[in-house]
Image (tube, rainbow, N blue to C red):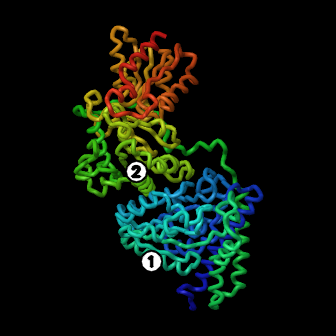
Amino acid sequence: MTKFKGFTKKELLEFYRNMLLSRKSDDKQLTLLRQGKVHFHIGGSGHEAAQVAAVRNFKPNSDWAYCYYRDQAFVMGWGMTVEEVFLHSLAKADDPNSGGRQIPHHWGHSGLRIVSKSSCTGVQFLQATGTALGVVKAGTDEVVYVSAGEGTTSEGEFFEALNWAGRDKLPVIFHIEDNKYAISVHVSEQTAGGSVYKVVAGFENLEREIINGTDFFESYKTFQKAVKRARAGEGPTIIVSEVVRLLPHSSSDDHRKYRTPEELEEDRQKDPILQFALACTENGIIESEEFDKIQQEVKNRVDKAAEWAMEQPDPEADTAADYVFVENRSPQKPAAPAKEGERAVMVDAINHALHEEMDRDEKIVVYGEDVADPKGGVFTATKGLTQKFGKDRAFNSPLAEASIVGTAIGLAVYGYKPVVEIQFMDYIWPAFMQIRNELAAMYYRSNGTWKAPVVIRTPVGGYIHGGLYHSQTAEAIFAHTPGLKVFYPSNAADAKGLLKAAIRGEDPVIFCEHKGLYRQGFAARPEPDKDYICPPGHAAIIQKGEDVTLITWGLQVQRSIEAVRLLGELQPSVEIIDIRTMIPLDMETILESVRKTGKVLIVHEDNFTGGFGGEIAARIVSQAFEYLDGPIERVAARDSHIPYQTDLENYILPTPTRIAKTLEKLVKY
């Protein structure tokens, strides 16, 4: 049988058909856009050869793919049908990518192991690296594909991913589709030397390739080599495919504003589909009439798929808030532990919870900065984990917070349960994109088909002479993030029970551990047994009262107890409620108390403005206004950074004295 560059005529026709299927889909989507039936389009025309060549070397449903928005030809080659592509473009209820939640060309298909992608450029690199880390831990020969345009490589997380993948020789293929433009910004303005290939030189264990991405045959050989290398455990490869962008950046762009007619014509001459057909006809392998026939067949198929998709149902409006969380607030109320041991301080209770949970579930991995033995964490919360479970399950990460959270998402997608540590909440902000737009949104944006139940432990709070950058407690920002649960225990028993609930749960959790509580005797408790779970969303009544409801959490529980004592003979009957968790929040217990007392004081360590106390106050006004006998008062950190010197710090943060004065004022109202 005659072959051309190692492929049979049948195979060559199939490659052509696959490229053309994406191109004709682009054309049809633009037609639907002009008709007002599609509201956005971002095309892959000009990228097809590199994508179809790439996908032929992977094992769909076994390997993993993190595809960027121009990867339409890739996802169709991976197994997504043309009907599914149009369900996505038309935002239909049965769209397997997002069910109408995301704009078109944001690929994700759990049945095909195409992981849900967001609009955020660069976040996928670390997630793919995390999934590749899961592959290595599982001992399989799976390979992870991740793609992006050349502009995205300006993001720092791209380099963080190359570093981690190279460090651990992970089986991940980084495909950079270089069409020379990040919207309107040319690569010469974007990248030092105008070459991504040159910029990434120097990463250990990283193989580099630069190819003509409009040449199917060159692309195929390069991906074949890279995938084979990854399966053999030899490490990652970055492939820079020089492609052409034959359409504007998106339907919201007009590239004629920044590209000359001559440049656009030059790109059209490099059209990979035309080049492929020309190579086959000039070498006598396929007649041009055969390509013409496929053109018509593909157009008919695309038209038919689009017509079918337009007839499918739209999502029901009342489903718009579905899939924010996997698990809602548990109706189960906290019960006393079946057994209790000796008194334990909070940091030890947390450490014991980690040991017990890792014993229970071998899929749990713990990592972060300095968490491995012999250090065992800067506060010793992870002490002994590496010694007991090995470096495969308790290990140090690079000093890069986005790397910690991004790889944790990828590990969770693979099926592991990452419990990661951000050493201080003050340093969580480099990871905020991964937390807010990725971790918290994965379940929602995939229409409930992908989830990432990562637990992020992070020490918070002041009163330790930490200054501006070791004293922050910013729980309100995370409580404001849909899809993210926020736990904030005030004592050792709750810390152990809530941490176990977070680990066993199916949603991502920010687990706040106040540094000022770690070793304090007042936060110590008889340690609950290994089976004790404190279900989130259930407040604790610390002391009952009739005159005032005092709502608080974390270290401020103890500060509030001390404040009540300061009032001495004037001491009112104060009901102190420790909410334990912000998300979910137990409004039932709060409202029941407010209806009884009629007066409310909320105490928290986060800033006054925008603090979570304002949310609680608003809900009380909305749901129990007629029961109030006075204004809702709040004591919180003053709206300032937190200074180092003792007197300055005490002026900013809540103190028992300030709480007591506000309480006295409220009682006398």
Q: Position of residue 357 (x, y in %)?
A: 32, 46
Q: Nearer the viewer, residue 379 or 105?
A: 379
> Where does the image place residue 526, in percent across and percent down from the top left?
26, 31
Position of residue 408 relative to residue 182, above or below, is: above
Tell me the amino acid under the disc marked 2. Glu
Give the residue at mark 2: 401
Name the mark nearer the viewer: 1 or 2: 2
Between 333 and 325, which is closer to the camera in this rendering? 325
Give amino acid for label 1.
Lys
Q: Is residue 352 above or below residue 134?
A: above
Left or right relative to 243: residue 226 = left
The reply to whether residue 568 is in sight is yes
The label number, if any, that marks residue 225 in the structure image:
1
Q: Residue at x 47, y 50 (%)?
A: 434
| 668 lies above or below 413 | above
Of residues 450 and 69, the one nearer the viewer is: 69
Q: Quadrant of residue 564?
A: top left
Q: Earlier in the sequence, mark 1 or mark 2?
A: 1
